[in-house]
Amino acid sequence: MEAVTFDDLMPVETSFWIVRIEQTDEQVLNVRIEDDPHRLNRTMTVKTSYRTYDLQFAGYLAASIKEELQGASFEGVREGYALQRCRDTDFLKYIKASMVVEANFDQVTKHFGVYCLNGLIDVATCFEPTVTLVSETGPE
């Protein structure tokens, strides 16, 4: 398994599919995503290979999982495509208002977005997610 960073995947202009979401520990959220070979990429050509990634959000404070774009909010400062690093969002403002937080909440809390074809996940955490390349299928 190859280790990559969340930042490595942010500039990737492709669509991902959420395969699995699970909470394995009290504050660990695991998300498996894959790049489906039967889907079109932004250049409207069929992909002939795909990768599967595991994203682990250890120490997450809150997560919001939606099945569709309706009601989704994309305000704030966002970097990336399907995987985004977000700042100054309503999601973070809501968490800050609804939790007892420390004075340095804004400096230590990060908002990551995983926006796939079959769901949207927003995660607030104090740590960078761990990303692992689980498998890679090439052209036949």
Image (tube, helix red, strand yellow):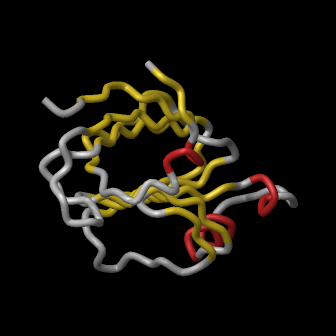
107 left or right of 44 in image: right
Q: Quadrant of the C terminus?
A: top left
For this rendering, which residue is in front, 130 or 30? 130
Residue 103, percent from left and from top: 87, 60
Hey, which quadrant is residue 112 in on the image?
bottom right
Q: Is residue 53 above or below residue 7?
A: above
Residue 25, horizontal then vertical, whole percent: 49, 28
Between 117 and 42, the one nearer to me in the picture:
42
Q: Left or right: 37 with respect to 1?
A: left
Q: Residue at x 78, y 63 (%)?
A: 106
Residue 139, relative to residue 118: is it above or below?
A: above
**Image quadrant where residue 30 sits:** top left
Q: Nearer the viewer, residue 117 or 102?
A: 117
- Total labels drawn: 0
Q: Residue furthest top?
A: 1
**Residue 118: quadrant of the picture:** bottom left
Image coordinates of residue 41 in percent, x first then y, are 26, 59
- Residue at screen point 32% across, 63% down: 66
Position of residue 9 in the picture relative to residue 51 (left or right): right
What residue is drawn where x is 42% and y is 29%? 133
Q: Residue at x 58, y 44 (%)?
A: 60
